[in-house]
Amino acid sequence: MKSSQFNALFRFSILIVFMTVELGAQEFDDPLTGDVRIYDIDYNEKYRSPLSLGLEYQSLSPFSISYEEEFSFNDFNFNTKYSFKSIPQLQPFLGLGIQLASPLRAGLSVEAERFSHNIYYGILGGSYIHKFNKQLEMGGDVYLGLGQAIYPNIDQETGDSRSALEFIAGAGGTAAFNMTYNFSLSVHPSLRYSRSFSALDMFNGFSFGLGFAGHYRVGTDPDDPKAVIRSLRFGEFDLPPLFASLQSYYSQNPIGQLELTNTEKFPIHDVNIQFMQAGFMDAPTKAGSIVELAPGESTLVDIYAAYNQEVFAIEGISPLTAELMVNYTARGNAGSQIMTVSYDLYDKESLTWDDDRKMAAYITPSDSALRNYASFVRQSARDVVNPGLNESLQVALQMYYGLTEIGCIYQKDPTSPFDAAQENPLVIDKVSLPRNTLKRGTGDCDDLTALYCSLLESVGIETSFITTPGHIYAAFNTKEDARNYQQIHPDKSKTLNIDGELWVPVEITLIGTSGFSEAWDVGAAEFNKYDNEAEKRGLYRTREAQQVFRPVGLKETDLGLQYGEKSIIARAVSQETDQLVNRIIAYYDQVAREKDSKSGYNTLGTICTQFGAYNRAEQAFNYALALDRNYLPSKVNLANIMYLKGQYQNALRLYHNVEQDYLSRSRTSSAAFSRIVLNLSRCYYELENFDKSADYANQLQELDPQLLREYSYLKEDGASAIRVEGRSGS
């Protein structure tokens, strides 16, 4: 390589390195967040030109010393390159050129003058070019070609030919500086091999070339404002007020629809739409994708909004401006358009009543403040729980009186009452979060309903909310089979049969002024009022509604709440529980008196036993036996009552009487007889007659060993039985 060629290559390399340092990493301001980011841009695709035209000069230095000092070799070629759309780095090219070989200076040998020549050639090859940024690109190329060498100074009279066919092959590297999108300068070091197909082969072999070229690229600079693609027309897009309480809803359900129209005379492809709200989204929300939009075609796209937790921190109304971003491809070029839209975002306590299920968003059973309070109330009433009464019913009245004890009362919202808001879906209503209602101690019907349902849900009781014209209140699931409504309330109309289970409605606005039973009665009456106008009444199961409207996000803090006196809660719960139990017993007592039958009194006694009213149960069973002294069910039940009351001798007498009845009828294989044998063993055990207890236990071992398994202590002898008794007593 000549020293001049080396110096030129070195200087150009230094320039390229400098540009790489200055331009290789570029920072951009994010238009959505204002953050400074380094964008991962595919420069090959963005600045692709489908076609480029170039003119190159190359100085060649043959590796053969024999003639290098006598000739200068200069090459000029015109080439055109094509860039594939799918792989813009791969660029096939076609070139036409002329190579001039002439003596370095006048006065050289006649032989040197004789062999000066020109080669006219064509080449076909391919390049791989990578763009590091808009200005810098590097790569390599390979090519093959054929040429025709002309030796004008050869005297044809001697019989020598003036022309020769040449084979050409080469490979090289390229480093280019793009002054603009359309114009670039490049340096092209290469290795070329030439071979003549004639006797004129003195120039056969390899040569090193250093070329400089200029290229013109067809197309428009993507960064030129005139080149920005505007293939889409946006339709009107007005967002209604949005609500923080519906944060999860908006990610699954559209907040609006955007109309897009292709204004081009050709189809556009890969249309992607995103919605971005700076400050309240971690990333743009994808709205949808369109594979192809035909010329003039319009389509509606659903817009979604995946807000983050920051929306729950706003207070009142926040006017916001968001961006709708659309990216697409038009005739192979990337297009992007942005539409700004303004709207109001309301805080987490605001909503409209266009869908009553939205109430579910305000029922927050996972709130630790509510869970702690519910736990306190249940602990307050644990000593007055009646094991025979429906558990859900008892918990519901416990929560009712717990709220009563802390002074919680109904207070109509003076600014946006529920009745006015429900009648007009455009009216913005306020629903207080349960934790705030609990702390404040007041609320309107929607506030108190949300609080009551949240407390019940926090302890695992399924709830619903009932809407009627101008009103909303709560209901809960007792899980009692609808056929057993008398176990909840003798009046069937006081309970709601929902999918075969009994639900209890509670007019929660009566809290603080009336008892639980009255709130229950009013709630049922309100529901039944619309039996003939069912369209005016709605019942929404909380857990189902929360599949659509999930509970609002909370930043949980301690409320500093005074929970009230446990003894006052327990006393109120005990009185209400007794009233509920007495009402149920009174119903069965009335039925028994009206029927005046042994089965009626036996049922009454069974119900009394269930609720722990043993004296009334004993009285009922004796009434049944007075009607029929051999009535076996009442005799067994009366024996059970005696056992429960600790009257073991009386119980033993009755059990033996029943035993003889079974023996006389040869019914000793029945499960009922096995229970009688078990109870005889237990009575003897309590009377410390352990031998007799063991005898009956052994008899039970033959009849039903599975039944005896949990009473295995009955089989032990006296000494060990005393130890068992002591162990159980401790």
Image (spheres, rainbow, N blue to C red):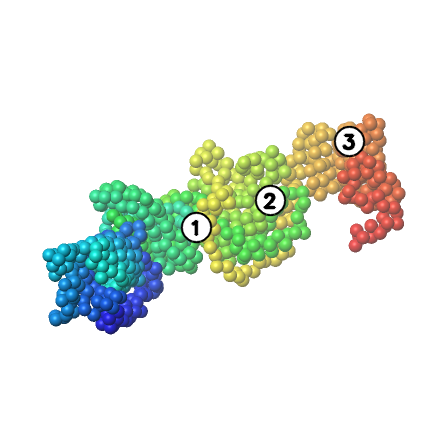
Residue 713 visible from this viewpoint: yes
What type is the residue that disc 2 sits on?
Answer: Leu
**Where is residue 527 shown, x and y percent of the image?**
50, 38
Quickly name the residue at label 3: 670
> Relative to the observer, which residue lies in front, 379 or 221?
221
Label 1, label 3: how many angstroms apart (C-alpha)?
A: 59 Å
Quickly name the residue at label 2: 393
Q: What residue is shown at x 36% (from left), y 54% (from top)? A: 284
Q: Which quarter shows the N terminus?
A: bottom left
What type is the residue that disc 1 sits on?
Answer: Ser
If you read the primary sequence from the N terminus, does the residue marked by circle 1 or circle 2 appear first? Answer: 1
Q: What residue is shown at x 49% (from left), y 50% (from top)? A: 363
- Count neighbours of disc 3 (C-alpha within 10 A) and say few if under 14, some if 14 to 19, many if 20 or more: few
**Where is residue 327 shown, x and y percent of the image?**
30, 51
Q: Secondary structure at mark 1?
A: helix
Residue 93 visible from this viewpoint: no
**Where is residue 700 shown, x and y percent of the image?**
81, 37
